[in-house]
Amino acid sequence: MLRFVVRRLALMVPVLVGLSILLFVWIRALPGEPARSMLGQRATPEAIERINNLYGFNDPVLQQYFTYVGRLIRGDFGESTRNGDPVVSTFFDQFPATIELSFAALLFAIVLGIPLGYWAGRRVGGWLDNVIVSTSLLGVVTPVFFLAILLKLVFAEYLDWFPTSRRSDARIEATHITNFYVLDGLITREWDAAWDAIVHLILPGIALGTIPLAIIVRITRAAVADVMGEDYVRTAYSKGLDPAIIRNRHVMRNALLPVVTTIGLQTGLLLSGAVLTESVFEIGGIGRYLFEAISQRDYPVLQAYILFIALIFSIVNLLVDVSYGVIDPRVRVS
Amino acid sequence: MTRKTLGTRHMIGLASAISLVALAGCAESSRDSGGGGDDDTTSPSDGADPSAGASGGTFIFAGSADPVTLDPFFASDGESFRPARQIFEGLVGTEPGTADPAPLLATEWETSEDGLSNTFQLQDGVTFHDGADFNGTAACWNFDRWYNTPPGVGQTEDQAYYWISLFKGFAKGELTDSVYESCTVDSETEITVKLTEPFAGFVAALSLPAFSMQSPDAIEQYGATGQDDPSQSAYATEHPTGTGPFVFESWVKEDQIVLTRNDDYWGEPALLEQVQIVPIAEPKARADALLAGEIDGFDLVGPADIPRLEDEGYQILNRPAFNVLYLGFNQAVKPLDDILVRQAIAHAIDKDAVISASMPEGTAPALEFVPETVEGYTEDVPTYEFDPEKAKDLLAEAGAEDLELEFNYPTDVTRPYMPSPGDTFNAIRSQLEAVGITVKPSADVWDPDYLDKISGSKDHGIHLLGWTGDYNDTDNFLGVFFGRKSSEWGFDNPELFQALNDARGLPTVEEQIPVYEEINRQVMEFLPGIPLASPVPSLGFAPNVKGYVPSPVQDEPWNLVSVEE
């Protein structure tokens, strides 16, 4: 297992280096230059020229790349060209917001998705199965931003059950230690702040979690239906085994493998969906920041953020692969 | 039986998840009805008279973005200036509700006849938030700090924009020909600032937050100078220290800035105990947050949100317009270099219809390229009344009956001068088509694509653009537009460039006024574009917010603002 993990980690290195080169070239191939974005309407040719010289935007791309790699080796990812914030510290300031949101979405998707999928899969073709399958189809095809706006309109604006935007109520005093607002509230025992943070996560969590929910339902359903047809399940029922044991040890354990893979892949989708959800609910996470960085050609932020996200995605997938071994002994052996 | 048991368990799980969601909603709404939590000390007997001894309360205000920095010298954006207006003060302020210079930390000033020397009398008994005295030494220290900004990032227009654009240069570095010469401490309450050339806008320029007086001790302690990026020093992010009515307390980036009342304020102490500034990017989301009671007020109300806010009893306050939206002509594209064609387009446009289709109520049509509030504005300029027949005749006379024009406009943006570019475009387009002009629409994302295309390339035709003024100086409008040859306008008019340059160098505003009036006439004769309107930017407030005075240049200190129970 250890060798497997080490090998996978080692494989990540060339992937990330390759990606960094591609990104570097791709970002610079975008039309529009960062200097104009930095200066906005106040850009004069002289001012643009001076910024280009100072930041090295005029240098040949290859030279810029080596300068960039040289700084990377020293652990320096540079500063945002929009506001001068150091990229790494900004990322770690904002990432908790995105993780919290993604976690809320995944929690919603898994807690609802696996039972619903199981239920549908146990009686394929039954009315409940039909309802669940067609509803989940609706979930897959509903764009995240549309659902986000709809939820906000109905539950925040019309019914006034939930806050309309942001991560916390400005009127509630909160101490921030980790920038995970729920966690901060629990650590500092500011229960109202923790509760407030949870309440702020519900609508965005549902909006972002709906597509993963629908996918998890469908994958679980298919996997459960598959396993239910296996001889050993029939045998287990025939010999009068406790249904709870059949469900947990025979059906779900075998059906979980594709589900876990799906959940792993969903993390990538969650990060891209977070861009839209964060924009609609005004959550200051990496998604919205990245979106702004693209539109304003903020090279250092784009390069670093996309690399970080790729790294996280790779690590999550590695964890998924490792978890196969835990769930399924056959994978461990092979 | 077995199956039923399993199903029921899951049902219970689902039901409890749903009830949790519903519970959360109820809890939230009950908190809402609890109202603004910590403003229990607020007891204004009469909100209309905020100075009647009311005190306490929290005011939560939403801007459109997080500030870039809290050191205003290195900022040029409105969101960075917003907290700066509360924390800091400059030598010169503005008369409330106008752009006219008024005493602030300087009680009076005098400019020598040659315009090269300015003597300021300083307010006595003012202290910075860190307890240090504000006096002549501190004031000159600030001027010298600006002038001695180290070469590097701090010397780019991205950061020290206002210093570079007004004072031109620094002690060291690439830009050395500075308008600033020296600051002398005559006494603890008097300083003299010497310039190397006359600069009539000097006193008005000092009302910009960029030239706020900052505590020398705090800057020296927390290293605002001498870094790679001075806008991100510990001083600029955690310890901004001024003399204003509010003291900086904390800044959680992308979340909130908290300021508390300065109890030792030398002027009228703030009524509010605390103010919070939160970033909410979308105009509609800001309106939603106000309606939901999550904030007490916000800036840049979208025109579409005004009716629903007013219907619910919320207040809409308009800032006097200090901007201009225009339809620009790129004369590098034929036949826009023909004055007859430009005049024809001017006669084809019904400004009132454009305004009613795409701008907030109260917006006035523009006569020239400076708004009415700016010195040098005159009604005595050539005008081009809406007359489609005349437009057609002029096009025929110019031999341009089959005129086809590329019409550029931006998407994904609202600016104070351009609240709804798509609607403005549509209104003008139909008017142009009515006189037989074929319009080829060309839409681009505002930043950087649109700006790149309009300001950085020749590849555009007629286009929508505008400008919001920074302070009361005609050069801040006309000089920005027509001070030099540019790819936006595509014309070369050395006479106009020279006239603007000469006007800028006149020693006093009084001497400048007739000159700028003449230039305004000259510009409208030449007709490089059509000034369309000066839309009024709006602020939205909860019904219980009192004492907010909108300013055309956003100089809105919140010491007289109160939030009633």
Image (tube, coloured by chain):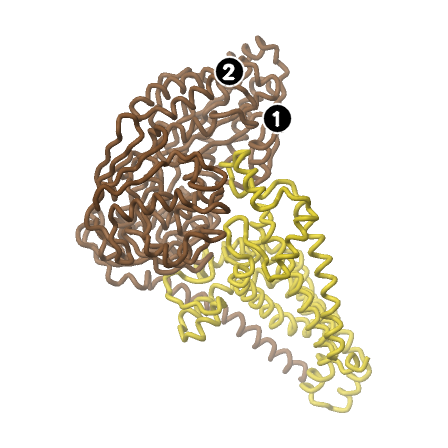
Mark 1 and mark 2 residues within 8 Å of each other at the beta carbon: no
For chain B, the rendered hue is brown
Q: Secondary structure at mark 1?
A: strand
Which image quadrant is residue A137 in? bottom right
Residue drawn at point x = 80 percent, y = 82 percent: A333
x and y, in percent, of residue B508 in the image: 30, 26
Outermost residue on the left side: it is B52
Is residue A113 among what the camera can see? yes
Residue drawn at point x = 34 percent, y = 31 percent: B201
Residue drawn at point x = 65 percent, y = 44 percent: A59
Q: Secondary structure at mark 2?
A: helix
- Mark on residue B406? 1
Viewport quadrant of the C terminus of chain A: bottom right
Q: Amino acid at mark 1?
A: Glu
Q: Say whether residue A167 is left or right of residue A78.
A: left
For chain A, the rendered hue is yellow
The crowding category of the residue bearing disc 1, from other C-alpha atoms within 10 Å (few below 14, some 14 to 19, many at least 20), is: some
Residue drawn at point x = 60 percent, y = 62 percent: A75
The crowding category of the residue bearing disc 2, from other C-alpha atoms within 10 Å (few below 14, some 14 to 19, many at least 20), is: many
- Mark on residue B343? 2
Residue A150 versus residue B309 in the image, above or below: below
Is residue B58 among what the camera can see? no
Q: Amino acid at mark 2?
A: Gln
Q: Say whether residue A251 is left or right of residue B146.
A: right
